């Protein structure tokens, strides 16, 4: 009877331990930043954003050069002009400077908007691929292993190769 009791306790402990192991969630990790940087769509989007940024920068630099030239011209001519004309010119320069600053802000906002338009679908595509790979491999949780993302140890399954394969690159 004692022997049977020991076997029953052993079976209960074995079943409990097996259930505990099976109940644990599977966790994997992926460096999302690295994935995004390697996606062909991201490279195209970054090139488009850089081109747009350079266009805005050239326009603003051109306006700044024009402002500087007007300032130099008005400074050189100020002695031969009346105080009223000098005041009018000063106001003109202030208005021109204000317009340049507004153009800089508008360019910045437009770049932010364009970045959101371009990057949103790319990140959604990456997220969908990560979810699909995680589900197919039976992972319950996927942690972002990007530098500074809070992941300390990454000994688990790295999904980056599988997700890249899912995305076709």
Image: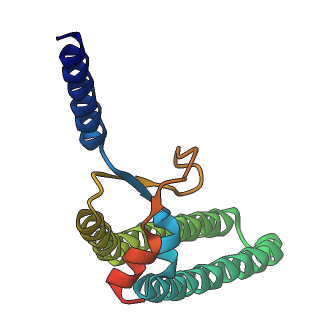
**104 or 74, which is in the foreground?**
104
Q: Answer above or below: position of 17 versus 101.
A: above
Whether residue 23 can be seen here: yes
**83 or 126, which is in the foreground?**
126
**Farthest residue toward the top?**
2
The spot of residue 24 in percent (x, y) is 30, 40
Q: Say left or right for 64 vs 22.
A: right
What colour scheme governs how the chains and residues are painted in the rendered image of this protein?
Answer: rainbow
Residue located 49% across and 86% down the image: 43
**13 or 59, which is in the foreground?**
13
Residue located 57% across and 47% down the image: 153
Residue located 70% across and 82% down the image: 65
Residue 124, picture quadrant: bottom left
Whether residue 107 can be seen here: no
Residue 32, picture quadrant: bottom left
The spot of residue 152 in percent (x, y) is 58, 44
């Amino acid at each position: 009877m004692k022997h049977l009791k020991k076997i029953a306790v052993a079976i209960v402990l074995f079943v409990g331990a097996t259930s505990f192991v099976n109940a644990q969630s599977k966790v994997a990790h992926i460096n999302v930043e690295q994935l995004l940087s390697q996606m062909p769509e991201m490279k195209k989007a970054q090139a488009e954003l850089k081109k747009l940024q350079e266009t805005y920068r050239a326009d603003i630099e051109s306006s700044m050069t024009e402002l500087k030239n007007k300032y130099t011209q008005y400074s050189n001519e100020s002695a031969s002009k009346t105080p009223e004309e000098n005041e009018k010119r000063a106001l003109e320069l202030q208005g021109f400077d204000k317009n340049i600053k507004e153009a800089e802000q508008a360019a910045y906002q437009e770049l932010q908007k364009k970045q959101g338009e371009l990057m949103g679908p790319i990140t959604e595509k990456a997220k969908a691929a990560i979810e699909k790979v995680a589900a197919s491999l039976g992972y319950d949780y996927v942690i972002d292993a990007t530098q500074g993302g809070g992941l300390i140890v990454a000994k688990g399954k790295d999904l980056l190769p599988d997700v890249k394969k899912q995305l076709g690159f």
